[in-house]
Amino acid sequence: MKTMTVMICLLRIPLISMGLSPAPVTAQATVYYVDQAHPQASDANPGTEASPWQTIQHAADVADAGDTVYVKTGVYDERVLITEDGSPGAKITFEALPRRSVQVLHGFNVSADGIRIEGFEITHDEGGWLDGGIWMGGNNVELVDNYIHSVPGAGITVSWAGEGEWNDVYIADNYIYGCNQGIMSVSGDSWLVENNEVERLIRPEGGSDADYIRFFGTNHVIRGNYFHGTRQEEIGTSHTDCFQTYDNNDGQAHNVLFENNMCTDFVHQVFMMEGTGSSHTNITIRYNVFEGFAAWGVCAHNIRDLHVKNNTWVGTGTGDPGTSHGVGFRFGSTGTIKNNIFTQIRAPYWSDDDSAYESGHNLTFECRDDPGPSSPTDLLDTDPMFQQPADIPGSDGVPWTSDDGLHLQAGSPAIDGGEGGTFIGAYEFLPDLFLRGTPTDEAIHLSWDVNADLPTAATWHIDYYTQTSPVYTATEPLSTTRSTVLTDHVENYQWYTVTLHAMDGPSSTLSDTVQVMPTGRLIYLPLVLKGN
């Protein structure tokens, strides 16, 4: 009889972001409309849908806590200054209706608490680099699903006023394109920055270094973001990092989590972090994909309790193959480096004499130098068996453009080579089809996960039998439902072998098998067997 196997599948991305529906309106709140295309639009109107206002600025001057301002399609030649406070439970919401149909030519200045800005297109080519598409100085602010582009400063600029500490900020699902910087800077306490895309940073005349995100403060989560596409010829002398922090201006960073981010095809460091004493502590970098960096993956100067786990690092970038570094602990840095894949870089990881880390279960492949000293549990010069290996970025001018090729094939040594038998790298191996069976009284409940594309005409075909019975079959149409119950010819206390096929005509394109024993009383263990 087969041994019992426990399998756990965790799909780590894409992530589920916070809802993008309009903020709830309380009984005391008012809904206002701005519609410059309306023939009777005027700021002297009451701001109803039938008698809307002309400008967003007038709405910002009138709206109070809990109010919602819908801005209808148009090009609004304004920089909107918001100074009236909302509250955590009664934000003042400004929402484009429909989304991305409203262009604000000079962006927003948010100098208030409890504000939500959602669904706008924002651009401008005036003012200094500090202006940004959205300039933000406030607590409990939500910036959601905006398209910010062609701005000489950052897509989103955060004020350093008030000691630069703005708390409980949510920045999600924004697309920032062709700006000098991405989000400058996460600070204060308890920010969630997720599912944003920042593409193709530039350096206009008088601009600053072109970084994707700078971070300071405490208790932040930065996850599911996609940063990519910066070109050397468009940033000039800028030094471009994906994530940067430092202790200038008394900057500190504590308890910050980076997970499920993807940084590809950019210029210099992935993480550039510099602290003094205990200014930067407990920073975790996990389940991220970083590809195409020309200098450092992590350059850590005196960062305490830095944990670098389960990331996939693919180097080379715009430099010569083998010149980029992996993770470097320097000048008093401490922490862990475990379960990472390092490929096509120079030194996967190392530290100077003043730093210390615990390492293990890392995999290196096509690296110029092995880590030194490496852990005895590391898999050195071992092919991770990515699903779609690509040419070395830069060797033929064609970088990788997505993470699809960095998932693991069946049989990869990274599948269970991590600490405690877990996986190595950013992505857990997900079989194309995974079948589960749950026994009950004279019934078998089946459910399954699909991690592959199926033909549109495919059907599900189920074979099940005991050692003494014929093969019984059941057919289910292809749909979003991934479960069924078998009751025909099912008796208690019999081992049934159940095989699920995805059928394309007469051919099986995917299949998986499980053994299940139905029983009226749960007295036999195991009741489910899963073959390897």
Image: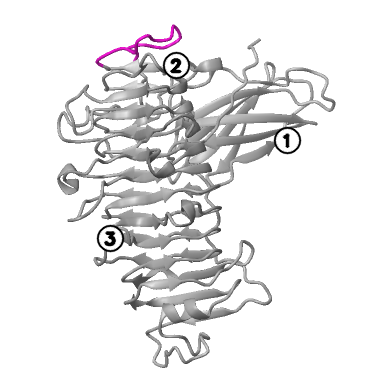
Badge nearest the viewer, 2 or 1: 2
Chief SS of the magenta region: loop
Residue 401 image offset from top left, x and y in percent: 28, 39
Q: Which residue is mark 3?
A: 151
| Quarter of the figure that contains the C terminus | top right
Along the line of sight, which residue is nearer the eye, 446 or 121? 121
Residue 294 image offset from top left, x and y in percent: 24, 31
Q: First in sequence: mark 2 or mark 3?
A: 3
Q: Which residue is mark 2?
A: 356
User: What's under tag 2, amino acid-wise?
Assistant: Ala
Question: Farthest residue toward the top?
Answer: 376
Badge nearest the viewer, 2 or 3: 2
The part of the image, by quadrant, that contains residue 298 is top left
The answer to whether any part of residue 387 appears in the image is: no
Instruction: State the residue at coordinates (67%, 77%).
Output: 28
What colour-coding does the image apply?
A: one colour
User: What's under tag 3, amino acid-wise?
Assistant: Val
The part of the image, by quadrant, that contains residue 405 is top left
- Picture layout, residue 309 above or below residue 130: above
- Residue at disc 2, secondary structure: strand
Residue 262 in magenta? no
- Picture layout, residue 423 above or below residue 69: above
As drawn, the label of residue 487 is 1
Instruction: State the residue at coordinates (28%, 58%).
Output: 129
Q: How many marks?
A: 3
Residue 11 image offset from top left, x and y in percent: 52, 35
Along the line of sight, which residue is nearer the eye, 500 or 173? 173
